[in-house]
Image (cartoon, rainbow, N blue to C red):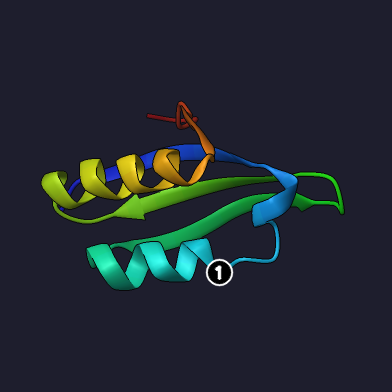
């Protein structure tokens, strides 16, 4: 299965929402949180996603549609 490393930048309104859970459940993706920093004003999560290519694309589009900035993150050592 393909893997993709991304960084999510959350707006304040979504910090308390279970978006990673919903992403995993709705798109059958396996998330691995590699790093996270969350404050009351913003959240940043480096996430490795494992799943089918089409599901990865749809899941990332879903996150962007919620107002989360999604940035590709290069993996070290690859």
Figure disc tally = 1
Percent position of residue 23, x then y:
37, 62
Q: Nearer the viewer, residue 12 or 71?
A: 12
Left or right: 47 in relation to 24: right
Percent position of residue 29, x then y:
28, 62
Percent position of residue 35, x then y:
65, 50
Image: 69 above or below 52: above
Q: Residue at x 70, y 57 (%)?
A: 15
Q: Secondary structure at mark 1?
A: loop
Q: Residue at x 36, y 52 (%)?
A: 49
Left or right: 6 in relation to 58: right
Left or right: 78 in relation to 20: left
Left or right: 43 in relation to 39: left
The single residue placed furthest to the right in the displayed view is: 40
Q: Residue at x 21, y 56 (%)?
A: 51
Q: Nearer the viewer, residue 17 or 36?
A: 17
How crowded pointer 1 is (Cα within 10 Å; few <14, some 14-19, many 20+) is rated as few
| Figure quadrant of the C terminus | top left
Percent position of residue 61, x then y:
32, 40
**Which residue is label 1 attached to?**
18
Q: Residue at x 19, y 46 (%)?
A: 2
Image: 67 above or below 62: above
Image: 52 above or below 26: above
């Amino acid at each position: 299965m393909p893997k993709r490393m991304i960084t999510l930048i959350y707006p304040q309104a979504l910090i308390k929402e279970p978006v990673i859970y919903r992403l995993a459940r709705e798109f059958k993706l396996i998330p691995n949180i590699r790093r996270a920093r969350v404050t009351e004003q913003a959240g940043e999560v480096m996430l490795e996603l494992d799943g089918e290519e089409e599901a990865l694309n749809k899941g990332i589009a879903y996150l962007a549609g919620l107002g989360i900035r999604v940035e590709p993150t290069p993996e070290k050592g690859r």
